[in-house]
Image (cartoon, coloured by chain):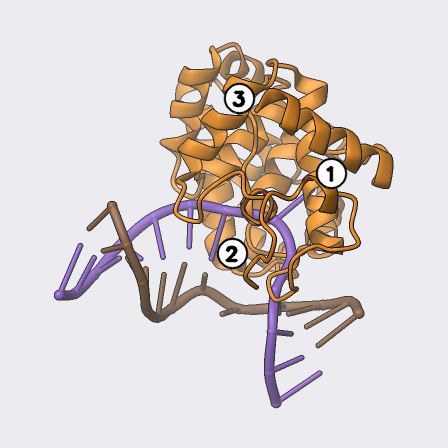
Chain colours: A orange, B purple, C brown
Amino acid sequence: MKKRLLEIYRNLLAAYGAQAWWPGESPFEVIVGAILTQGVAWVNVEKAIAALKGARLLSPDRLAQAPVETIADLIRPCLYYNEKAKKLKAFTSLLQDRYSSDLFSLFALEIPCLRQELLSVWGIGEETADAIILYAANKPSFVIDAYTRRIFQRLGIIDEKATYAAVRTLVMTSLPADVPLYSEYHALLVRHGKTRCRRRNPACHDCPLSALCLVSDVAVG
DNA sequence: GCCCAGGTGGGTA
DNA sequence: TACCCACATGGG
């Protein structure tokens, strides 16, 4: 499996080049982006982050002090802005209550503890937690998203019923725990997914991964 | 007008 | 466990 996953990685890298993820000027900005991007295109997140910056609210303390209504209004371009304003507050509350608003105290935890701590926050699920661990804390935790599942499914690597944990474990037990590798791999999967493996698209023929596909005639969707 | 985008939580059977 | 729904903008 290791050989196969690395082969996929190399093909994607050759086809699309390095993706330079995650865009963000600070770890906190990465976290905010990770929450705001839930179920929404990144262009919308950029607008929201710009608005938060403009209002000088892009820091744990400032965000913790700001009313949810104010935050919601600023992040309106993102979908579900009321929900997401609450999620941002939930995270800053954790940071204040348990880590004296110090991000690096939180990041000092080992990956399993850090992951549990993040998952305990309302609004942070597995994908968001792993994105924060990988791209903000710079620790090796592979991010599984809808594209990853779809692509691996169409390649015949995973079952459509595979759980998040199962896919993540498969990848993490096969690949070395390497932050640059995990970062780039996830970014490339998203890039490929956007280009080729959208929900309604038929199977990938004529694509960088077609030679690696174990399934001859993949079902749509 | 329609589809869908770098998800999560809560409710029901 | 396994679905189903709410959340509710903006670009192609």
**Residue with the most extreme front position:** A216
**Which amino acid type is marked by label 2?**
Glu
Reading the image, the residue beneath label 3 is: A172
**Which amino acid type is marked by label 3?**
Met
- Decide which of A220, A200 is in the foreground and name it: A220
Q: Looking at the picture, how far across and down is residue A171, in whole percent? A: 54, 26
Determine the image quadrant of residue A81: bottom right
- On-image quarter of the N terminus of chain A: top right
**Label for residue A80?**
none
A94 over A188 or under it: above or below: above
Image mark count = 3
Q: Secondary structure at mark 3?
A: helix
- Can you see residue A172? yes
Dot 2 alpha-carbon crowd within 10 angstroms: few under 14, some 14 to 19, many 20 or more: few
Measured in 3D between alpha carbons, the distance from the residue under mark 1 to the one under mark 3, in whole angstroms, is 17 Å
**Which dot, 1 or 2, sits closer to the camera?**
1
Chain for mark 1? Answer: A
1 or 2: tag closer to the N-terminus: 2
Reading the image, the residue beneath label 1 is: A188
Reading the image, the residue beneath label 2 is: A69
Q: Looking at the picture, how far across and down is residue A61, in whole percent? A: 56, 30
Q: Secondary structure at mark 2?
A: helix
1 or 3: tag closer to the N-terminus: 3
A203 over A118 or under it: above or below: below
- On-image quarter of the C terminus of chain A: bottom right
Determine the image quadrant of residue A126: top left
**Which amino acid type is marked by label 1?**
Leu
For the point 57% across and 42% down, the residue is: A152
Measured in 3D between alpha carbons, the distance from the residue under mark 3 to the one under mark 2, in whole angstroms, is 40 Å
